[in-house]
Image (spheres, rainbow, N blue to C red):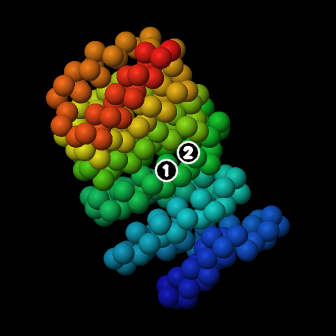
Amino acid sequence: MINAMFQDCTHSTNALLNRSAGGMALATLVPATVSTISLLAKSSISGLQIWSLHGLLLTIEAAGLSFVSHVQATLGLALEILLSEENGRVDLQQGVGRLINAIVAVLGPELAPGSIFFSRCKSVVAEISSSEETATLLESVRFTQQLVLFAPQAVSVHSHVQTLLLTLSSRQPALRHLAVSTLRHLIEKYPVSVIDEQIEDNLFRMLDEETDSEYVEDSSLNINLIFDH
């Protein structure tokens, strides 16, 4: 039965990815695909949960706004997976983080600060970040980036800046690069608000301690963007 569900799910996901379904067909294809993948995601079979999370990610990206009605159930599934006995697996946590970030891109303006969707997204990201693994921390920084790009109303510039400053001093190059990129988006969208945070000294101090030439270049660009305004 699992094998048959897997094949049906693969066919449906491929149809979505190939954009072969029109608007009317999506109304049927998306619910069926989400339902099947969600069932597979609850399986205890090794590797199947990872594949299912990836399948849901692809479905969200392909379906776009057609996925909105499935967000609540998907968030519930993400929490269920994290609370399961396998929640210590970094690959599962990373998969859940990617799922949340895709949901943020779809919901956008719907992620109001007091909304249940935002609260659940934030809770899931906080949970996966608690492991302090680089892979999950990357998804946490991407969550900040997604909020800046798609749901700027959800979190204040001040909160974003404080979060990013902590990450900019990380020992992990991948985290620092993503943080500096996210900060650039923030400066470009809200230059005055970022200037009010007076972070120039922090950025200069980090530059003095940095040996990564690419990071130095990106950070210098951020500083120039601030001074240009």
Classify 34 as above or below 71. below
Q: Are marks 2 and 1 in contact (CB under 8 Å)?
A: yes
Classify 228 as above or below 1. above
For residue 227, side relative to residue 19 (left or right): left
**Residue 91's image quarter?**
bottom left
The circle on residue 100 is: 1
Q: Which residue is drawn at 49% across and 49% down?
A: 101
Q: Which residue is drawn at 66% across and 73% down?
A: 18
User: How many C-alpha atoms fall within 10 Å of the one at disc 1: few (<14), some, or many (≥20)?
Assistant: many
Where residue 71 appears, x then y in whole percent? 60, 52
* Numbered disc 2: secondary structure: helix
**Residue 163's image quarter?**
top left
For residue 87, side relative to residue 50 (left or right): left
- Front-lying residue, 228 or 167: 228
Specify the amino acid type for callout 2.
Answer: Val
Evaluate whether residue 75 shows in this view.
no
Where residue 222 appears, x then y in whole percent? 40, 27
- Cα separation, mark 2 vs mark 1, equals 6 Å
Classify 18 as above or below 220. below
* Numbered disc 1: secondary structure: helix
Q: Which residue is drawn at 37% across and 12% down?
A: 198
- Number of callouts in the render? 2
